[in-house]
Structures are given as structure tokens and as C-alpha cells.
Image (cartoon, rainbow, N blue to C red):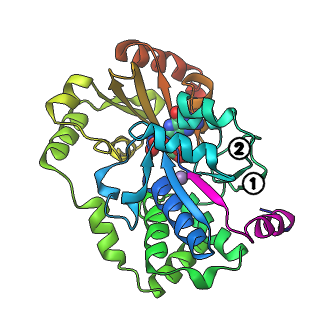
């Protein structure tokens, strides 16, 4: 965010405002961590905040400080709609276009004249925001919230609770500090958070070591379904609604499964296709290693987007047809992928 915008925001926040902070649909550790951290910081500078996400978030994030205050739009629609309509400023965190909050919320947001403030690290940010802090080189939106608080000269207000939320966002979006988006600055921010006294080992454990037996068995099914397309250095996993149902699927259970496909030796492009009968879509996650841009692939063929090495998308035909489309589309990248 440039200095003029920071100054304008500071001025706007010099009196108490009603502020809504939004995360994207299918909220992940970064969306939840970043929104909660920003909310807690803004409250410390005497603002009134409401965090809203379009749909529910995984249980492995429900221990986060103040996570029980988050309004879930599709469950508390009336209350969330009122908060959004009453807001004087709406922060949009961890997403680049309003379509990422789902149709109902998108229409509501588009009907407003309220100013938006975007903090996000996804590619191709939209033009809807008055205040814009977009940086695609950042590890996570949570790391950006840390820098944003610094820009607002509020670093001294970061307490253990805010630090825990920021650390969780950084940790989850960097795959525990291993993806290429992890910079030395990311580690410096993490170090400062640890210096504030957060229990980093506990955070890793709370997020990653609280699996249900059903989730582990679902992972077994996913790994059994792994397919390798050797000439394309590509691997993919499928999960049908029936397979999810048989393992008592809960939100977040498939988080990270796609990384197992990417971990196969020689694989540079991985995907997971998950059937969602209720929404009548196939939700897809894409991952890559190196130069192959899954953001472009998801954008061009599967109505999605994200980052160069991690993106998502969707398809509204059957799982079988989606896989067949996927394999057809791969042909277009044969040279690129076979040279990787
Ligand atoms: P995941 O595969 O973990 O759901 O998401 C990977 C990355 O792609 C995240 O940064 C996420 O925000 C983004 N992403 C996931 N699904 C979509 C989608 O349908 N559209 C867009 N534009 N981005 C997505
Ligand atoms: Mn993120």
C-alpha cells in the first residue's frame, strides 16, 4: 500500500468506524489467521470489527483466538448481511476478485457503495478496492497483515493472540515454511512472532496433528486413486462424493492431499479432483514445482486461478468428463511439461 493510501486510511480510522473483514470461500489457515489478526489489531486502535467468511472453515482452525466470533455467511446470513450493509469500510483478505466469496455474497458486495481495502497475495487483483495492498511475492496474506500493521505504526500492539493468528496463516500457506514463496523476510517475521512468546510447536500440533481416523483412511483412498501421467510429469488424485461420504468427510479433511501427488519423484504438476454433489461441481486444486504456472492453467481451463505454483478451480461436468477434459487440456502443454 503506498504512503498516500496509508495516510488516508489512518485519517479514516482516526474515529471509530464499523469495519467488516472478509475472507474467501473455503476459508483456509491464511484466510482465517489473517482476518482474525487484522480484526484484533483494529480493535486495539478503537475500531469496531466483524469478521465474516462465506462458508464454514475446518475444525483444525477452531482453536484460533477469537475464531468463535467469526460470522459464517451461509449459516448466519441475516446477521452477516446486516453487518456488511452497515459497514463503513470492508477489508477483503486473501482473495483477488469478488467472485471468490461465492455468488450470494458477491451480489451483495457489488450492490454497495462502501469503500473496500484489499490485502492479498494472489495474482491479477481486481479493481474494486479504494485501498489496495497487493503483493504476489508474499508468502501469505497473514505475512502482509504483519507488514500492514507495521505500516500503520502498530507493531507494538501485536500481542500473543494476534501473533498466533499471523503465524498460523504464514505456516499453513507456506506448507510449514517449505514452499518457494517463503522468503528470508517470512522467516524474520516468524522469528519476531516467536520472540513475542507464541507457542509455535503447539500451533503446528493443533493444525497438523489433530487428524480423525476417518481422515487418515480417506487419505488412504486418495493415495489408492493416484494416477501418474508419465509423459506429462503429471499426477492426479480423484475423490468421489461416495468416497467422501464413506469416510464421514468434514470440511478441511482433504487439505494437503494434493501435495502427496506432487511429492512423487519426477512429478512437476499435480491435481486433485473432488466431487461435490451438493454444489454440483468438481472442486480442483492444482500444484506445480518450477515454471509451470497452475494459475494460468486454472484460469484458462477451469474457471479458477491463484498463484504460479498453487491454484484452484472448478468444473460443472461429471468427474469422469472433468478428468477427460483435464487430459485433453494437458496436450496443449506437452512440450512445456515434458521438458520440466
Ligand atoms: P487450494 O487448492 O488450496 O484450495 O487453493 C490454492 C490457491 O488457489 C489458494 O491461494 C486459493 O485461494 C486459490 N484458489 C483456490 N480455488 C480457487 C478458485 O476457484 N478460483 C481462484 N481464483 N482461486 C482459487
Ligand atoms: Mn493465502
Give the left or right position of residue 25, taking residue 19 as reference. Answer: left
In-front residue for pair 220/149: 149
Q: Quadrant of residue 194?
A: bottom left
What residue is shown at x 60% (from left), y 85% (from top)?
156
What residue is shown at x 39% (from left), y 68% (from top)?
65
269 relative to 320, above or below: below
Asked if residue 309 can be seen in this view, the reply is no
Percent x, y for residue 93? 59, 52
Percent x, y for residue 1? 77, 62
Circles 2 and 1 in contact, beta carbons < 8 Å:
yes
Q: Which of pointers 2 and 1 indicates the residue nearer the eye?
A: 1
* Quadrant of the drawing holding the C terminus: top right
Q: Is-magenta flag for residue 5?
A: yes
Label 1, secondary structure: give it: strand
Give the left or right position of residue 238, taking residue 114 as reference. Answer: left
> Which disc number belongs to residue 125?
2
What residue is shown at x 29% (from left), y 32% (from top)?
226
- Within 10 Å of the Cα at label 1, are there few (<14), some (14-19), or many (20+) other Cα atoms? many
Asked if residue 213 can be seen in this view, the reply is yes
> Which disc number belongs to residue 202?
none
Q: Which of the two labelled residues, at mark 2 and mark 1, occupies the earlier sequence position?
A: 2
Residue segment shown in magenta:
4-21
**Residue beneath disc 1:** 132
Percent x, y for residue 169? 47, 61
Amino acid at each position: 500500500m503506498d504512503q498516500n493510501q496509508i495516510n488516508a486510511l489512518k485519517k479514516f480510522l482516526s474515529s471509530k468506524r464499523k469495519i467488516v473483514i472478509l475472507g474467501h470461500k473455503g476459508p483456509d489457515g491464511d484466510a482465517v489467521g489473517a482476518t482474525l489478526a487484522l480484526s484484533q489489531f483494529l480493535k486495539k486502535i478503537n475500531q469496531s470489527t466483524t469478521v465474516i467468511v462465506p462458508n464454514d472453515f475446518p475444525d483444525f482452525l477452531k482453536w484460533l483466538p477469537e475464531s468463535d466470533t467469526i460470522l459464517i455467511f451461509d449459516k448466519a446470513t441475516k446477521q452477516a448481511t446486516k453487518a456488511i450493509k452497515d459497514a463503513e469500510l470492508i477489508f477483503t483478505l486473501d482473495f483477488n476478485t469478488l467472485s471468490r466469496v461465492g455468488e450470494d455474497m458477491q451480489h451483495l458486495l457489488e450492490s454497495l457503495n462502501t469503500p473496500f481495502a484489499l490485502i492479498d497475495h494472489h495474482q491479477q487483483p481486481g479493481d474494486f478496492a479504494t485501498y489496495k495492498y497487493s503483493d504476489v511475492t508474499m508468502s501469505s496474506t497473514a505475512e502482509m497483515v504483519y507488514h500492514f500493521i507495521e505500516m500503520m505504526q502498530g507493531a507494538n500492539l501485536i500481542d500473543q493472540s494476534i501473533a498466533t493468528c499471523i503465524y498460523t496463516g504464514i505456516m499453513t500457506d507456506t506448507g510449514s515454511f517449505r514452499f518457494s514463496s517463503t522468503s528470508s523476510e517470512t522467516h524474520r517475521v516468524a522469528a519476531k512472532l516467536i520472540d513475542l512468546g507464541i507457542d509455535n510447536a503447539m500451533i503446528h500440533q493443533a493444525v497438523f496433528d489433530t487428524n480423525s481416523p476417518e481422515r487418515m483412511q480417506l487419505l488412504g483412498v486418495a493415495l489408492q486413486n493416484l494416477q501418474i501421467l508419465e509423459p506429462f510429469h503429471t499426477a492426479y488424485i480423484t475423490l468421489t462424493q461416495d468416497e467422501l461420504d464413506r469416510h464421514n468427510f468434514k470440511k478441511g479433511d482433504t487439505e494437503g492431499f494434493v501435495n502427496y501427488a506432487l511429492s512423487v519423484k519426477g512429478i512437476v504438476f499435480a491435481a486433485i479432483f473432488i466431487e461435490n454433489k451438493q454444489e454440483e461441481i468438481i472442486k480442483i486444486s492444482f500444484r506445480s514445482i518450477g515454471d509451470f504456472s497452475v494459475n494460468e492453467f486454472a484460469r484458462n481451463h477451469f474457471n479458477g486461478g491463484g498463484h504460479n505454483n498453487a491454484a484452484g478451480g472448478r468444473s460443472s461436468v461429471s468427474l469422469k468428463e472433468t478428468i477427460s477434459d483435464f487430459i485433453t487440456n494437458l496436450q496443449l502443454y506437452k512440450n512445456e511439461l515434458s521438458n520440466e
